[in-house]
Amino acid sequence: MTTLDASRPTHLNIEASSDNYLTHTRGLLSWAFTLDHKRIGVMYMFAILGSFFVGGVFALLVRTKLLFPDAVNWMTAEQYNQAFTLHGAVMVFLVIVPSIPAALGNFILPIMLGAKDVAFPRLNLASFWLWIFGAIFVVISLLAGSFDTGWTFYTPYSTRTTLGGVVWVITGVFILGFSSIFTGMNFIVTIHKLRPPGMTWFRMPLFLWALYSTALIQVLATPVLAITLALVAIERVFHIGVFDPAMGGDPVLFQHFFWFYSHPAVYIMILPGMGIISEIIAVHSHRHIFGYRFIAFSSIAIAFFSFLVWGHHMFVSGQSGLMGAVFSLITFSVAIPSAIKVFNWLATLYKGSISLNTPMLYGLAFLFLFTIGGLTGLHLGTLNTDIHLHDTYFVVAHFHYVMMGSALIAMVGGLHHWWPKMFGRMYSEALGKLGCVLVFVGFNVTFFTQFMLGSHGMPRRYYLYQPEFQIYHVISTCGSYIMALGFIITGICLLKSLFSGKPAPANPWGGRSLEWQCPSPPPHDNFPTTPRVGDCYDFSIVRWDDSAGGYVVDRSLDPELNPNAPKRAGAHH
Amino acid sequence: MNAFFSTIVPTIATAPPPAPRELTGGFWLPQASSVNAENIDATFYFITYLGYFFFALIVALMVIFVVKYRQRGREIHAEGPTHHTALEVTWTIIPLLLSILLFYFGFKGFLSASTPPLNSYQIDVTAQQWSWSFKYPNGVVSDDLIVPADKPVKLVMRSEDVLHSLFVPDFRVKKDVVPGRYTTLWFNAPEPTGMDARKAHHLFCTEYCGKDHSNMNRKVYVLNQAEFDEWAEYQRTADQRSPVDERYFRVAPKLYKRCISCHTLDGTPSTGPSWGAHDGLPAIWERTEKGLTKFGDGTTLKDYIGPGKEYETPEAYISDSILNPGKHLVAPFGNAMPTFKGQISDVGIQALIDFMKRLDEFDAKGNYLKPIPPLPQQTADPKKTANAAK
């Protein structure tokens, strides 16, 4: 007789389940002032998804204008410039930067560690409310006259534009930066101090390695952005020249400061996504992740190199040619850990037991899209081809493949992966897959055409364009509508599951790490006692159990947890 | 004898609406029209084919593995290796070597692209919201870029206001134009395009610079050396050659193209005050003459024009507004206008003032409503003209 995990639910009726974090306490204030990392994660998630909707509406407005090469009477050039600026600023600062760490990371990280919460629950709550205040300032900036600087706030345009929302939005981004720093600090301490017995650094789930690397960047790079934006605000309000040459400043200095944060920020966005993909591919292949150490070290390598490559945004900015050459060389060093990860994920599929559930479809979509995003990065890291492609739609397509096709797809994949855990409900696989396929097809139609637009010379941030580019713009816009439909279906699928979804078992996919060994949804304290862990990618002790309605992790078979466990071939290599 | 001037020069002088151009070049890149372009294209295609290879490899393996190892039922048979150091080192080293190779190609091409030859022909470029101005060694200033064929051309660029960036896709050149700095780029375009707008190359601003960023594009015309010299010489004397009382329709409309993005003629609000009648004010000349213009500080123009005041005549006020904008700011506008000092001659300013006095002879875009009679020809050298006409 094998003893199954003690925390596995004995029955599947959620309403009857005595305690879970959703029903632990009731009332609005019990959410607003909760210290529970799971509730904070859920609040973050809905706030971020709301922002994603707003950013998406701006994107559709921009794409719809671009159906026509000439001016349209329903959107002026000023409105267009505000729309693409808001799309960028909302998507970067309110959606992608916080999305995975603050929403999914907050929920999953402590459970993966078998901990009751993050190290500093109050700091965690403060981080969430700072996000809300930051978002309020962004909304105020719209009421105060909006802004049209592009999300990059390049000087001296940002210190000269007459629109009144610039200082407000800068304040908002400043506050959002602290929200990000708090989350990062919390995760660093939590991972250092709260790992359970048996979980050495090289036993951590790879999602935790990714969150740890991300947290390091958040803590080290974000203050630079805060100071830079504060300087822009000071220049605008007090006319103290820092970046505007008319006041004795240097506009290229702003670009150095800005990209010193914003290039690492690209990895704040993509690294947690890579962590999710490591989890999704291993769990849905039911197979030990291939080359654990290479993947873990490549996360740290990417975090390290991310601080040394900012100048590749500035090959044509007027910085010296020597600096361009040095930055190009270092930039290629980022390509290597990224390539390692892709090959290791591929090798993880080899001889697995691959189930094509919705999260896995997103995982495979990520592999496809990230490969394109990464390979086109080579064109932009190479000095002489970048001269031609810089600031064209080629760059727009490239970073959408990486930021949206990779980071955001990973986020949506992770959402589907952990949704049953978060809410104790299964969504409709058919609807989930339909949404995923539409998003995937729509995404490629939208952005692959933009590579061609860019390589043919179409500059970005253009309200009017040459008529010969129109056909590509029309195709791209059609793709964006397909993608929007896909996201709407995905939203319906997930929301519907909350009301009519089947109750989720503790472990619907056959996962091995700790979050699959507590009930869905987890109780307030996650685990009654801190569980000991073994190899979190050893799937040989995971099996289907009809009475649980899902998979179970048979801890008695793990030789590390049970000295009497039978030795099994293939469990360790 | 006048074939050259009648077909080529007026194209510049009155700028017809841009003729639609087909996409040129191949699936990925537009036509390569400069000496350095071939080099850049070779790197581009090398990376692209490398990309095709790795993309096909990765997607093929992914599909094969997913089909071959998909889970049947709910059983788990996962037995693959957990790592394989030799394999992993291999796929670390191969990308490393390829990266170094790519860097080398890019660096080599970058060196030649950023080093203008010593004998380059220099053109000074001034960018401002939202126009370009190209100044040639003989003092001629143009809105479109006209360059000699088969000769290295160096652009020395500066900005009057915010960041801009000069981009000619067909030449594969791009460089930011930075206020407070001089930046340069160079190219050598071997094939002449003549003054044919359909053959001319696009020139774009590729650094976001505000409202009319996407309107800040012009054409590059490549002329063979004889045609180019002819054009430069003709332009140098063109303004002076036209009779004084005809300059308002010969000289002013092409200057006005640099004003139109902020100053409309039909009263439509824009970045600066419209020259047409609007908000109860008459058109620009009448309101200036009568001193009706209101300033942001509460004063009106009446307070400044007249004997012993800041401006003796209305003309002096308009001239000063072009050369020293921002001295008196018309309500409710901000200080957005750059100075045109050194970019516009006295002849040009006088022509613009005459243009303002007779706005009713122009359409909303500043085109003269009547046909423009041919200019009496004085200086053209018949021999050169005959060559050019071929």
Image (cartoon, coloured by chain):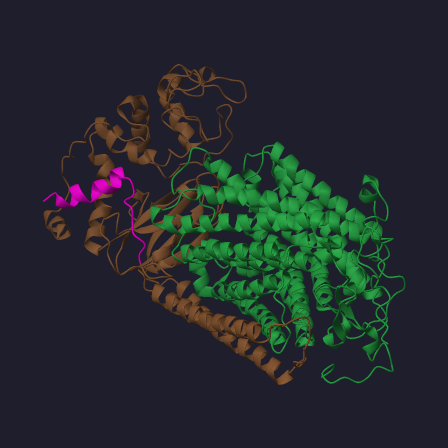
Chain colours: A green, B brown
Q: In the drawing, does residue A279 fall left or right of residue B205?
A: right
* Above or below, comparing residue B315 to residue B131 in the picture: above
Closer to the camera, B308 or B148? B148
Q: Quadrant of residue B186?
A: bottom left
Closer to the camera, A405 or A86? A405
Residue A50: x, y in percent?
65, 44
Does any portion of residue A153 appear in the rendered image? no
Q: Residue at x 26, y 37 (%)?
A: B14
Residue B242: x, y in percent?
20, 33
Q: Residue at x 69, y 68 (%)?
A: A283
* Above or below, comparing residue B164 to residue A1 in the picture: above
Residue A271: x, y in percent?
65, 62
Magenta range is B1-24
Does any portion of residue B97 appear in the rendered image? yes
Residue A283, magenta (yes or no):
no
Q: Quadrant of residue A150?
A: top right
